[in-house]
Image (cartoon, rainbow, N blue to C red):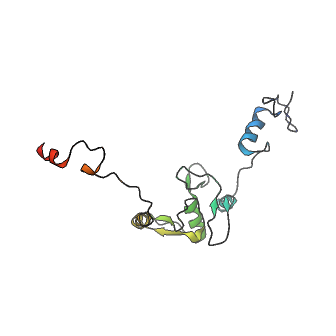
Amino acid sequence: MKCSVNGCNVPVRVKSLGLCFKHYVRFKTYGTVERKKCARGSLEERFWTFVDKKSDDECWQWTGYIQKNGYGRISLGSKSQGYDGSHRVSWKLFNKTDIPDGMFVMHKCDNPSCVNPHHLSISTPKENTQDMIEKGRKRVVSPKGEGNGKSLLNEEQVRLI
């Protein structure tokens, strides 16, 4: 029995769907047996294929690769050029300039997958950290000494030692 996809003469591997392994994997991954086309072209052309653009005051969601930390990521081209954050690329494309060395691209909306350039601004690491603290996103560090629940000694015992 051959694969049910037109032009494919490979034996069926998944009988319930009538698909060969290649077409089954495509169906499982993309929801279709058709070949998924890779975004090609300039960085700007590729960038916009992954943006769910809305009005200027709404978040524009990144629909491409999302890292575990919630930030989008896009290839800058060849392997040697590497990757960059989608929000950083958005800021660069909108402002038509590079991000100064040592500076961050900060979200005003606190949505890491947002690439709306109206929600992005350049900041120093200190300003970025201050913004995080003001908005209550700073991780709490365990207290030191007796205030730490895993503390084995109290202050008096430490002095005696």
Residue drawn 52% across and 52% down? 69
- Tell me if I can see residue 96 in this picture: no
- Depth check, front residue: 155 or 111: 155
- Depth check, front residue: 16 or 52: 16
Q: Quadrant of residue 63?
A: bottom right
- Tell me if I can see residue 104 in this picture: yes
Residue drawn 54% across and 67% down? 109
* Figure quadrant of the N terminus: top right
Residue 92 sits above or below residue 66 on the image: below
Q: Quadrant of residue 96?
A: bottom right
Q: Position of residue 24 (x, y in %)?
A: 76, 36
- Depth check, front residue: 48 or 80: 48
Residue 28 sits above or below residue 128 on the image: above
Q: Position of residue 14 (x, y in %)?
A: 78, 30
* Figure quadrant of the C terminus: top left
Residue drawn 30% across and 43% down? 150
Q: Quadrant of residue 2?
A: top right
Residue with the most extreme left position: 160
Q: Position of residue 9 (x, y in %)?
A: 85, 32
Q: Position of residue 57 (x, y in %)?
A: 62, 72
In the shown orientation, is residue 9 left or right of residue 35? right
Tally the marks: 0
In the shown orientation, is residue 95 left or right of residue 143? right
